[in-house]
Image (cartoon, rainbow, N blue to C red):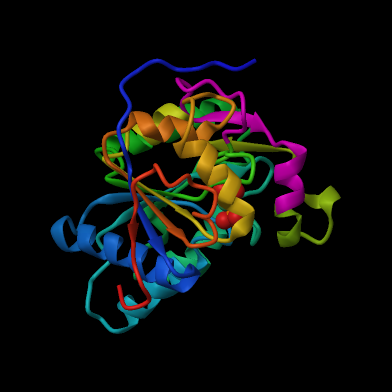
Amino acid sequence: MTEAIRRATFEPVIEVWPGPIEVGVRVAALITDLVAATPHAAIGLPTGSTPGPTYAALRAVAASRAVDFSGLTVFLLDEYVGLAAENPQSYRSTIRREVTNDLGIAADRVFGPAGDASDPEEACQRYEEQIAAAGGIALQLLGIGRNGHIGFNEPGTAFDMRTHVTELSEDTREDNARFFVCLADVPTHALTQGPATILDAGRIVLIATGAAKASAVARAFVGAVSVDCPASVLRTHPDVRVVVDTAAAAALPDSVPRVVHGAEG
Ligand code: PGA
């Protein structure tokens, strides 16, 4: 059932870049700016294909030694149920391999909900406490699912939920099957920061690239703020930056303000 939300909404800053590489360079610059101002900040990071170019750009900055990322604390957006942190397919392993190891961030400063906990609900509570103990997340990076999900908050998730156990939709399992040998291997449940956890971040940066995301991006930022499109809740946060490529922006009506950048920026 549609739950339209009536609360203050804000206009996010929407930046449109030519393609995924430019999006990645731009988002890496936003993160680098944060680190320059606040070297010991906590940031929230997602896995998935979309942030790949961002992480490549961050690794390049780290390799050049232009910025010291080692003071950061990292909080994962979500984690599969049933996978221990050490499992190569866990999101914690993935984020270490793709980002934090090369950024010089110690493994014990990379937090995620414990996918293999015997009591997942308790693990969710503990994760909320870890985020709070770090002083909250200064910048949360997000992708968006084709169905409008953020993290593993699938359509219908109440906006006041915090980190919780969720059952993955079939769409999401199929989308993620490419990271596994076969669909049957994709876990059925995950632990995810809830919409309320995500909204507590100081700044939110949502990235989307490719035509497959165009409809979800349009539903997130046009029309009702509704649990039918979880990303639409981002319009209730005062500091959201949406960094998309031309293909992902294609379904936004002309009435939606945006800043269009060329390849040179
Ligand atoms: P993707 O996933 O970056 O792999 O497309 C995004 C998401 O589902 O949130």
Of the 4 image quadrants, the one containing the N terminus is top right
Q: Is any part of residue 43 visible from this angle?
A: yes
Q: Is any part of residue 78 visible from this angle?
A: no
Q: Position of residue 45 (x, y in %)?
A: 43, 52
Q: Residue furthest left?
A: 37
| Total marks placed | 0
Q: Residue furthest bottom?
A: 64
Q: Position of residue 62 (x, y in %)?
A: 32, 76
Of the 4 image quadrants, the one containing the C terminus is bottom left
Answer whether residue 236 is magenta in the image: no
161 vs 94: above or below: above
Depth check: 181 or 212 in front? 212
Magenta stretch?
153-175
Residue 67 placement: quadrant? bottom left
**Residue at position x 41%, y 27% in the image:** 196
Depth check: 196 or 104 in front? 196
**Residue at position x 32%, y 78% in the image:** 264
Answer whether residue 165 is magenta in the image: yes
**Residue at position x 44%, y 35% in the image:** 127
Q: Position of residue 157 (x, y in %)?
A: 57, 24
**Residue at position x 45%, y 74% in the image:** 56
